[in-house]
Amino acid sequence: MPYGWKIEYNGNDISDKVTGFSITANLESYCREMTLDIADRDFYNSLDFSQISEDPEIEIFTKVENTFISQGLFFIERPAIASTVQSDILQGVWGRSITAKLSDPFAPKVNKVWDSKTTFYSVCAEMCTMAGLTWDEAYSGIDDYVILANTYEADGLYPVDVITELAGFAGALVTTDRSGHVCIKRIDYAPAVADATIADVDLQGISETPEWPEFGNRVKITPTGSVSGYSLELTIPDVCLPADGETRIKLYALVKDEDGNPVNGIITSWSADTMTSLLAYATANTRDIRINREQKRASNYYSVKVDFPPSSVDGVWAYSDTARKNNLAADGYIMDGNTITLAKQLAYCDQLLVIDYWSSGVAVNHIYAGSTTEDVTVTVSLEGETDKGIVYIDNPCQCPANISLRASPTEIHIGEEALLLVYMEDSGPVENGRVVYMTELGSVEHGLLAWEGAHLGPVIIQNEETAAINEVAGVTQCELSMYPESVTSIYETTEDENGNKIPTGSNLYASNEGKTVSLNTILISGTPLLAEYVAVGAVVNRFTGTALGTASLKAWADSSREAGLEATCQVKVVDETSEGTETRVIYYGEGDEFDEKKEPEPAPTCAPENVSDVPTDNALSGRFAGPRGQGCSCEEMCDQEIGVYGTTQNYEGASYRKISDIVTEDYNYAEGTPEYWGKYNELKTAALNACMDQCSECGTPLAWGSNPETIAPGTSVLISVTGGKGPFFWSVSGPGFSLATNGVSESNSNLLIADENACGSATITVTDDCGFDVTGYVRSTVGVWCLTEECVHGSTPPQGVTATVEEIRGKYKYVAIFCYTYTGGACGYCAGCMSLGSCDTPLTPPPTGTVPSNNTYCCCQASEAWEWKCTC
């Protein structure tokens, strides 16, 4: 062919459709660029510029003698249109060589701290693999060098940026060749041989501008103590922890240089004077961090002071703006030290605000609570400088409970409802069942509350806004505002047609420790997220607007302090001409209104018993008994084990190794990589299946069979249980009673023996291999009924008895006495009317049965409990 070059498109020769090309290569560029001028209009119109292919589509060859030599593979990334002096339009395409995969838009950003010793070549190989390229150290012009643990971090960098920065430390550049290799070229700042020699007679003038590497052949001299110029400040936003062995809080250390500017990349050392608590890290690097939902009161109408000097501000909202509709920083702000000055005037000079912002020069650590009550002194140090703080473990005087009250929405019309969320913490999550009260303040009522007193319990939280943070190597996390009982989902956000944030994409939830949630993917810090979870220690009330104005609402509760706890919020009731506020944060969980007769009922946790100390086969099988008795499913219990232990108790021979540790230790996958999550999900499924299989084997819980109710002295009767999983453990108590098989038996039946002196009742207890147990009773024909408990509903004993209802169950007999008849469509007296068993809760077991009502008799006046004994 006549051409001295050849162009191929996906392997097909298109040289006749091209009028020319250009290739640009630069020593300081990691990829080559090409431009094709296309003459064939139909071919040009067939190209799809809406998306970039995963693989290069263009290969350019030039002819050397009789051989075509490839000048590289190139992507088609965008059109390249030019106009000549004759106004002809040249249609072309522009693209880069295959090493473009190392950056946007092909590669993901890297958020990682290399927390173990590695090398430059190893990191290069890791970055190339992430981008789908192959690293070959033969194309490196510099030697490999060691990177110590926790000395290098990538925060939102593309793979090429990581390689470029590390190469720059050794005075080298990242470039490429026509074959698409990733090449590291050393910069020769003092060459021994000239590239060319030009005689003086050929020169009119000469200028020389040397360039020196950013890092190279430098000596750092670090003085000790305060002479180094660094200042160190430890901040512990929440100093309280419960002694539960698992809850953690964050610790921050701010490092500034001698000019008062925050400094990144400084290693801080940490220690704690503690008996059982634990620091997450012994050292931590300073870096850029995002502070989420920091609550501060304004200093004046324009300014607010935050805990750390901000480098940028994502948003400032009024605390009452739970939907985050009005970003008070959107109109502009000025940063000066720790102070943010807003361009927009605030509603109050001391307004409570919620601030999201970034800060530099901050090292982050965590401390996990131990199981012992203590005051822990935490020390952070840096080159002779130290700072200390105290964390209180289970100290109710230093750490009283706190209560919060939020409304959503904060503006309603007359007749509409606002949801009111009451939430309490007490050095960590509080137990369900604590009592809180609510009222509207002021002499004028603007609405009605659904209840005035309630018990705390679980509440579903939907659409809570949070944001991604990268504070742990290889793991993106986010923070919830309340302690969760369980987490349902974490999603990225988009906006609907009304500007409301809604979930998008897939569920990113992987696991959680307290309020900190780990995600199953890597995100850029600050990425907006929406959370759905079940909060503990909360309750929802409803406020219905009845009159225009602003309602001030208060929630309060008793505490270990004399003053008690209280929190307030406001809800505006506006007329129909106002738009009101969209509800974005949604709470599910009605107020559990109570009276003097009702006691708190803790919610079931569905958490199997912990048998880690003695993980025998029987213990592992029996760990489901308690939750199964509460109605928990196998799926719920096994999911709970993953959340609590990071594995299931019977997986991998009951090793109790977290699945995440198995993936990193046994398979050598770096945390957060696609390979890591693929293997993690595979092993998690296997662990859940192992748990589900063992749980399902337990089948139906034990039940007492259809057994004889009585036995004569000197005889025996066959008794049995139904359901359960063998072997079974049998035991009996009662004067003169024994079993043919006492102890372990494979059979679900046994022979009850009564000797000649047997009297009263035999109590038989059977426990199966899964831990379920059942108790049954058989009465001897020798014995008497003895009154053990009596409950009178009213101030006087029963008078004018109209009916007596008896129920015998095992060794117990229950008697209900009715004194009033149902006449004229209503009871003659109902103030003390209770069904059978309502006042018999102290009795064991409580009675059951049918009680006559709304027919002949009503209004039980008294209840009695009797037991069959040898004598009274």
Image: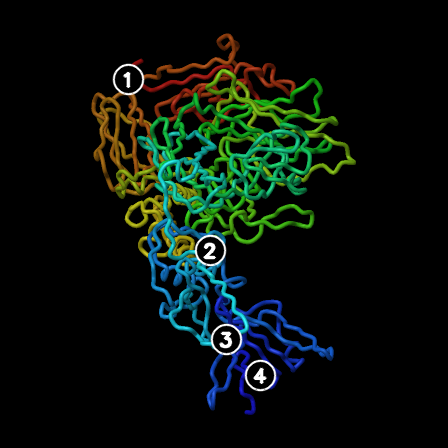
Query: Residue type at mark 4?
Result: Ile
Residue 706 is left or right of residue 544, and the answer is: left
Query: Residue type at mark 2?
Result: Val
Q: Earlier in the sequence, mark 4 or mark 1?
A: 4
Say what secondary structure mark 1 lies in. Answer: loop
* Residue that badge 3 annotates: 73
**Residue situated furthest top in the rendering:** 796
* Residue that badge 1 annotates: 870
Residue nearer the viewer, 585 or 141:
141
Q: Earlier in the sequence, mark 2 or mark 1?
A: 2
Decide: marks 4, 2 in contact (CB < 8 A)?
Answer: no
Say what secondary structure mark 4 lies in. Answer: loop
Mark 3 packing: few (<14 Cα in 10 Å), some, or many (20+)? many
- Alpha carbon of mark 3 to alpha carbon of mark 4: how far? 15 Å
Position of residue 109 measured from the top left corner of the image (x, y, whole percent): 49, 56
Residue 576 is left or right of residue 698, and the answer is: right
